[in-house]
Amino acid sequence: MTAKQFFNGLLIGAVAILNWGCSGGFQSASSSNALSALSSVTPKTGPSVNAGLAKFQSGLYAFAQTANCSQCHAAAVSPTFAAADVNTAYNSAKALVSMTSPDASVFIAYSGNGHCGVASCQAATNPANVQALLEAWATAETTGSTTTGPTTGTVARYLTQAQTVPATIPLSTSGSSAIMRFDLSRLNIAVPSLAAATLEIEIQYFDANKSEYRILKPKLVNNTAAINLQGIHVYLKTISQTTPGLEDINGVAWDTANLTVPITKVTTLPATTPINVTPLETTADAVQVQSSTDQITIGFDTLN
Ligand code: HEC
């Protein structure tokens, strides 16, 4: 056997293992139509995401970061409603809010009463903002709906805005892909070095059944400092579902990402073709199609 034959043998072995590993997902994808695909996904074990947690995260929690309550209430000062771990923050905040009378919460006064001795808790507009966030949070808690959440247990801390998938998506066999770009200045929690940054993913249909997306080649450009990035999550939802939606059991290839993204400057992003920089991940993520108006949200566990 020549070296080349040996190498080809290895490659075929690798492809066979890959197919074996994914066969459950791909088989169920091709045997179900797009709209019923969700029910054929066997969720991973782990708590489902509750609508209250999602609302807290995009509401009071995001406010606490932007208003800089996190300077003290991330760890140094109890209550730790701005803790790095969103579940810790959630439990801490929840103890101070009655979900049946959110307007009575101590958060409203404290957001503007000057107790902190710095600017964060002195803005005159804070109490009204916080009141609205608490009311929305309480509504989400009391309507009690458990959204179809990511199946890996927790929502990622940083979330992009949801984007509808492109109207035209090539098959993976065609070798080409459509692109989706996420404006990282619009993360739920602002990261200063990403104020002009973009995350791009490429998207294909796995095969002619068009029941499974292949998501590949995540790229991050125009960060102004090197970024430590951990855990990339691809959430999918229909247009009417609550953000962020479902993380497919086959779509967890990037969950354990732990990388440093160097400063990557691309002055003009190509209009219709992928950005020509090295992707953050070389494996593809697989996500079942739900509808013709599916929306994707990208989540990150750590960005700093
Ligand atoms: C510089 C530090 C600092 C910052 C910034 C800060 N706090 Fe506090 N916070 C404290 C300290 C210290 C206490 C405990 C003493 C007290 O109650 O005044 C506290 C207590 C609280 C409490 C608990 C009240 C209770 O009765 O249990 C709430 C709620 C609170 N802060 C909300 C906020 C909010 C909202 C922000 C941002 C808008 C914020 N804090 C910013 C230092 C800070």
Image (cartoon, grey):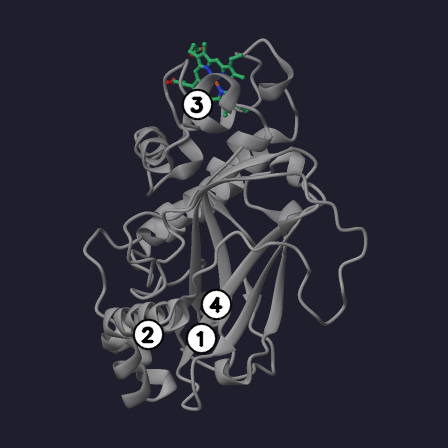
* Residue at 58% in and 8% down: 117
* Residue at 56% in and 73% down: 165
Q: Which residue is mark 4?
A: 215
Q: Which residue is mark 3?
A: 74
Q: Position of residue 41 (x, y in %)?
A: 26, 72
Report the amino acid beneath label 3. Answer: Ala
- For residue 89, which quarter of the picture? top left
Q: Position of residue 77 (x, y in %)?
A: 41, 14
Neighbours of disc 2 within 10 Å: few (<14), some (14-19), many (20+): few
Say if 185 sits above or below 48 in the image. above
Report the amino acid beneath label 1. Answer: Tyr
Report the amino acid beneath label 4. Answer: Ile
Q: CA distance from mark 1 to mark 3?
A: 38 Å
Q: CA distance from mark 4 to mark 1?
A: 6 Å
Disc 4 residue lies near ligand 1 with CB under 8 A: no
Q: Nearer the viewer, residue 276 or 202?
A: 276
Q: CA distance from mark 3 to mark 2?
A: 50 Å
